[in-house]
Image (spheres, helix red, strand yellow):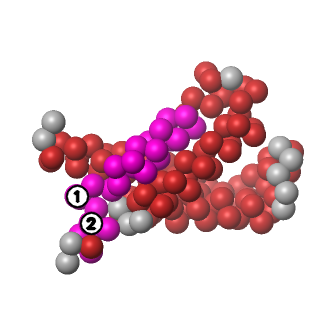
Amino acid sequence: MTVRGVDLGLLLVRAALGLVFVSYGYAKWAGGMDRFAGLLLAAGFPFPDLLARAVAALELGGGLLVLLGVWTRVVAALLAVEMAVAIARVLWPRGFVGGFAFETVLLLCALALLAAGGGRWSLGRAVLSR
């Protein structure tokens, strides 16, 4: 695969991951915060209201940063941790299919970006190369 192909692949992974997290983070801020905090409380997480807002901020802000390719590795690491915790603490009993399959894809995309970075076609690379 050419360098251009790798960079296109990273751009597509960033777009997919970023769009999903932006949309889910926005949904929490736009009216789903109480429901999400209730889910966190039921799962035994401490400070569910504060944690719900922190997760929503990570998803919305982190999704935007991933889309732009800014601090890609750092944000991808945070998103990977979020997905790993969601799978382990909430979704595992439901099983893979119908449970945590989607979150596993998000986790693997985040790990791919953690390993590879945002690629050449990212704002982070454009700023750093100046």
Q: Position of residue 124 (x, y in %)?
A: 32, 68
* Residue found farthest to the front: 115
Q: Are marks 2 and 1 in contact (CB under 8 Å)?
A: yes
Residue at screen point 62% across, 42% down: 84
Residue 116 in the magenta stretch? The answer is yes
**Which part of the image, by quadrant, shows the C terminus?**
bottom left
Judge left or right: residue 125 versus residue 49: left
Which region of the structure is painted magenta?
Answer: 103-127
Question: Where residue 101 sits: x, y (%)?
Answer: 57, 29
Q: Which residue is mark 2?
A: 125
In this rendering, is residue 74 above or below 101?
below
Main structural element of the magenta stretch: helix, strand or loop? helix
Element under label 1? loop
Q: Which numbered disc flags the more N-terminal residue, 2 or 1?
A: 1
> Is residue 15 among what the camera can see?
no
The residue positioned 35% from the left and 54% from the top of the image is 117
Q: At label 1, which amino acid type do we have?
A: Arg
Q: Which residue is mark 1?
A: 120
